[in-house]
Image (tube, rainbow, N blue to C red):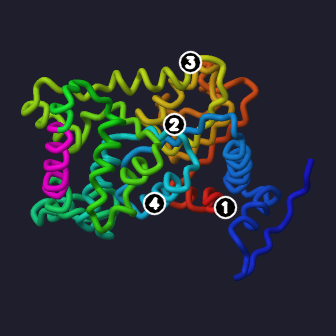
Amino acid sequence: MDNVRDLKINKDMKIKDLIEQFKYIGGFQAQELYRGYEILKEMLNDKNTIKVLSFPADIIATGIRGVIKDIIKNKLFDIVITTTGTLDHDIARLTKDYYLGYFDSDDIKLREEGILRLGNIYIPEENYGIAIENTLRPILDDIFKELKNKNKNLISTYELIFEIGKRLEKFDKKEESIIYWSYKNNIPIIVPGITDGAVGTQILMKEYDYPEIQVSVWEDEKFLASKFFGEKKVGALILGGGISKHHTIWWAQFSGGLEYAVYISSANELDGSLSGAKTKEAITWKKIRKNAKHVNIWGDITIILPIIISEFL
């Protein structure tokens, strides 16, 4: 057994040096963070591994959007699996701002003032729904017209997201966009629940205008099947829970399970939810290999992710 060592810090210390000390301080989640860092380092350096980044949309309403953007910009992962709100917030913030708020706000007063609250983030109503519509409607119209002219009546959601990203070139803030860098670096964003958000509703409205054209999640699933079926090495950084987490580990089982798995979540397993389920539970489902390198880091993604990923950016 290694002995517990006192943490030594100073104002000139680099984040990497701090993380490496976490190995020995016995600092509860600090030690798990160190393990996650080591697993990520090995996974990202493994050229034979398909790397998946999974996260829910809420963090994209925060400044963590910039970290996710940089991860995609620097091509650390091959595939992104997320929820529709990621597209919503990314598009809205191209032209409008979100603001700092409070968890203990008077929500009735906020509603009367036209302020949407997401945790401790304030979003003026006109900075969300209307902003998304104003940005996305002409983009979707251009995409659907092009599809019609090419006699193409089927498109996957990840291909549609690429097409949206291509049309963000004219925006001043394009380089802040997750969607834009997904397109630039050809990193597919898979959104299995595409209908569950403002972007999904805008796609539905456009399908009424172009009934011969269908945006199909089944095309996304065929793409995932082509990537995951067979004995392949797959690793994942899974932030939070929900459909993005489950879709990642669901597809991993078809390659024998994740070889590397780093979970960062504030959910717990006491209610039997998927969001709170630990990596070791996924082993029973064959979604993580028995001999996999895996860790659960319990805490706030907005604090932990910048610390654990900074060394690789």
Residue matched to label 4:
64
Query: Element at badge 2?
Result: loop
Q: Mark 4 and mark 2 in contact (Cβ < 8 Å)? A: no
Residue matched to label 2:
276
Residue matched to label 1:
311
CA–CA distance between discs 2 and 4? Answer: 21 Å
Label whose residue precedes the other's in the sequence (3 or 1)? 3
Q: Tell me the amino acid under the disc marked 1.
A: Glu
Residue 275 in percent (x, y) is at: 48, 36
Query: Element at badge 1?
Result: helix
Bounds of the magenta segment: 130-145
Residue 4 in percent (x, y) is at: 86, 59
Q: Is residue 243 magenta?
A: no
CA–CA distance between discs 3 and 1? Answer: 32 Å
Label whose residue precedes the other's in the sequence (3 or 2)? 3
Residue matched to label 3:
229
Q: How many marks?
A: 4
Q: Mark 2 and mark 3 in contact (Cβ < 8 Å)? A: no
The residue sitting at 27% across, 49% down in the picture is 88
Whether residue 300 is visible: no
Query: Element at badge 4?
Result: helix
Query: Element at badge 3?
Result: loop
